[in-house]
Image (cartoon, rainbow, N blue to C red):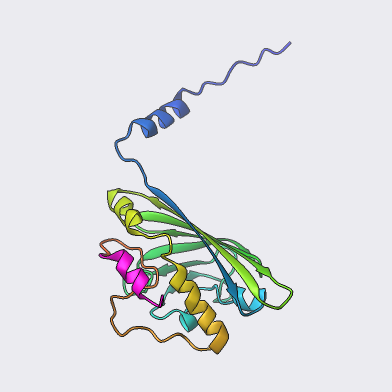
Amino acid sequence: MNTRRSANTERSDAVVERFRQRPFKAARKAIGMRQTFPASAGEVFVLLCPSREADWIPGWDCELVFTESGYAEEHCVFRTDETCVSGPGVWVMNHYEPPRLLEIARFTSDMVVDLKIVLAENSDGTTDGVWNIVLTGLNEGGNRLIGQIPEDAYEGLLQTLVHYLETGEMIEAPAHPAHHVHKIGKGHQALTNHIRSHFKK
């Protein structure tokens, strides 16, 4: 005979009800991209690193917070500030599986960005990459920024990686400091124009 009583869910029900009744509704946008790279999966994957990105992304800089190696690894944590091309944020590598899978969460005052990168090497030595990005607003400012981001916002960034793989050199950046590859930060104006104007020829 089962005499187990039903669970009391009043407290969890109250949490859910507060969420349903709150006036702020978080915006969410998902962006997906595909790119074929002229290199092996290993050659591409090693460049998806907070340290190595300084070699191929103009304007990239970061502060490494925790990494045993000084490079990308599981649970690596790093920080960018307003001077970085990406804008400010704290980044955490949640899943690191060379040379196939990388998952990163980025936290700013206005939004959370989840990034999942999957690489698959082809028989001809090239690599197909899939970038899946999910942006979630944390406040009205974040919601507005998300609304300004076009579906092709990050494609220019992938082209900079193609260029580096082909030439071994960073692509020449515009001299104007306001141009950004994929800057998402508080108070960033004309985001769409900045993204599209940088490297997407």
Identify the magenta region: 189-201
The residue lying toward the viewer, choosing from 100 and 107, is: 100
Q: Quadrant of residue 18?
A: top left
Residue at 29%, 79% in the rendered image: 177
Q: Quadrant of residue 176?
A: bottom left
The image shows residue 113, relative to residue 40, as above or below, that is above
Q: Is residue 14 left or right of residue 175?
A: right
The image shows residue 9, relative to residue 45, as above or below, that is above
**Could you tell me residue 165's position as x and y percent?**
57, 83
The residue lying toward the viewer, choosing from 108 and 187, is: 187
Residue at 74%, 10% in the rendered image: 1
Q: Is residue 36 left or right of residue 123?
A: left
User: Does residue 195 appear in the picture of this structure?
Assistant: yes
Q: Quadrant of residue 117?
A: bottom right
The residue lying toward the viewer, choosing from 192 and 74, is: 192
Residue at 53%, 73% in the rendered image: 49
The residue lying toward the viewer, choosing from 192 and 181, is: 192
